[in-house]
Image (tube, grey):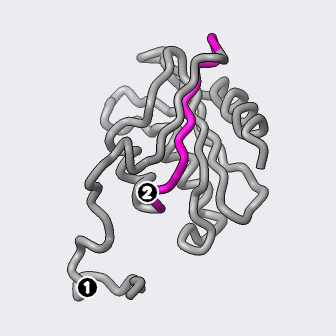
Amino acid sequence: MALARLIEAALQVRQQAYAPYSRFQVGAALELKGQESIFVGCNVENASYGLTICAERMAIGAAVAKFDLVQYPPQRIVITASPIAAPCGACRQVLAEFGLELEVVCLDPETPTNWQTYKISELLPNSFRLAHVPKELTNTPRES
């Protein structure tokens, strides 16, 4: 999938962000391996700040609602915010759940030449993963 399609989707959904407290609008567009669909999310703030939903987690949730992300893992996510911002710690952990090779593209729509690319493994080294959970506590299949 062309990066331009993801960027445009992230820019469009950013306009839908509900950010009355911070005025910090974020848009995210997620691509899954082997799928043409784009899953988008925007931040939704709440007067109780802890209940705020980040754009990245909203995009992951939309993808989970439609596809098995073990079978179709996230391949790339574009995040748009001004100023440019990488995912928060909670989003990094959620994204890492679905693969450490996920490409994260962060860009500032005010200065389109200002963008950064990472692998989630760079943003969250030594992440806590399914392999750390004792097998007897989960019935999730694991690779041998």
Where is residue 9 shown, x and y percent of the image? 73, 36
**Which residue is tagged 2?**
100
Quadrant location of the C terminus? bottom left
Question: Relative to 19, does residue 61 appear above or below in the rendering?
Answer: below
For image coordinates 60% across by 55% down, the residue present is 75
Residue 63 occupies quadrant? bottom right
Q: CA distance from mark 2 to mark 1?
A: 21 Å
Residue 128 shown left or right of residue 24 in the figure: left
Three-letter amino acid code at the position of disc 1: Lys
Q: Which residue is located at x 54 percent, y 55 percent?
A: 61
What's the mark number on residue 86? none
Q: For the residues carrying marks 2 and 1, which lies nearer the camera in this image?
A: 2
In magenta, the rendered stretch is 99-111
Residue at 58% x, 17% y: name it.
114
Disc 2 and disc 1 in contact, CB within 8 angstroms: no
Please tell me how crowded label 2 is: few (under 14), some (14-19), or many (20+) other residues with Cα within 10 Å. Answer: many
